[in-house]
Image: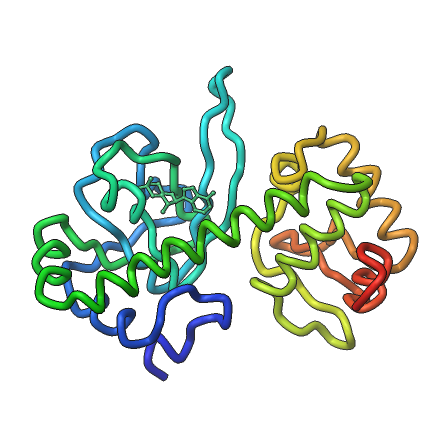
Amino acid sequence: MSVHEALPSSALLDAELWDALCGLGHQADFASGETLLFEGSASESMLVLEAGLAAVSVADPAGDEVFLAFRGPGSLLGEFGYLDRRPRSAMVRAVAATRCRVLPRPVLDRFLAADPRAGQALSAAVVAKMRAVTDRRVRYAQGRIGTRIGRVLLDHADEFGTPGQGDDVVIEVPLSQGRIADLVGAGTRIVGLELARLQEAGLVDTGYRSRPRRLRVLDPVALAVRVDGAA
Ligand SMILES: Nc1ncnc2c1ncn2[C@@H]1O[C@@H]2COP(=O)(O)O[C@H]2[C@H]1O
């Protein structure tokens, strides 16, 4: 299977651009916990995430990390800084063994100058990411806290889920209570209470006993109905 065949349906790059970018630059491997991009550092390259998983976060004014998103295979990383030449807007860290293609600025400049359609495809990928960020920003901030948390779980089940044994979906990324709390702008304790409620209702398994710990959405259809009144 070629790498782009392995892309999740949520991948924001078209296959042609993906193949071309993966033929440029050099490969870099990161162990879980290693930093791919440092917030505030100079933007001298763009990365293409080929395999693994990264977490994007920013430091709040107190210096605490606020989680923004997971990025999986098929994602661009560092495209903001590449395009606007400003320092990195966020910290990007591997949360599993991760393989990237590193495209130094001069290499990518040459490639885009030779193929204007690639530049358009790159812009389209950036805009698609921003649309997704805006959509989530609204849905994670509006409504009851249980509703907002339900939307986070459904989105992650959709993007990073694998089928369980029945109708359930295992969320294959470390979506901790702290990360959910950051996404919905609530405290970790409230998130814990709401997850316990969803577990009691038979909709979610918080995965206390699983190693590595993974959340499971036991009944995605029922959770979607509870959250937004529709499957
Ligand atoms: N809200 C976000 N969601 C997903 N990825 C992001 C978000 N904000 C920043 N990034 C990524 O994190 C990278 C940090 O470096 P750049 O600003 O160059 O490019 C940024 C994007 O690739």
Q: How many marks?
A: 0
> Residue drawn at (44%, 59%), measured in percent from left and top?
72
Going by the picture, which residue comes out furthest to the top? Answer: 62
Horizontal side of 124 relative to 62 (left or right) equals left
Is the image coloured rainbow, by chain, by secondary structure, or in one colour?
A: rainbow
Horizontal side of 228 relative to 105 (left or right) equals right
Q: Image quadrant of residue 218?
A: bottom right
Q: Along the line of sight, which residue is nearer the eye, 42 or 118?
A: 118
Q: Position of residue 5 (x, y in %)?
A: 39, 80
> Residue drawn at (22%, 66%), measured in percent from left and top?
118
Q: Tell me: residue 184, above or below residue 76.
A: above
Q: Position of residue 79 (x, y in %)?
A: 29, 49
Q: Along the line of sight, which residue is nearer the eye, 162 or 33?
A: 162
Q: Image quadrant of residue 28?
A: bottom left
Q: Position of residue 100 (x, y in %)?
A: 28, 57
If the image is split into quadrants, where does the C terminus sit? bottom right
> Residue drawn at (32%, 50%), measured in percent from left and top?
30
Q: Image quadrant of residue 21?
A: bottom left
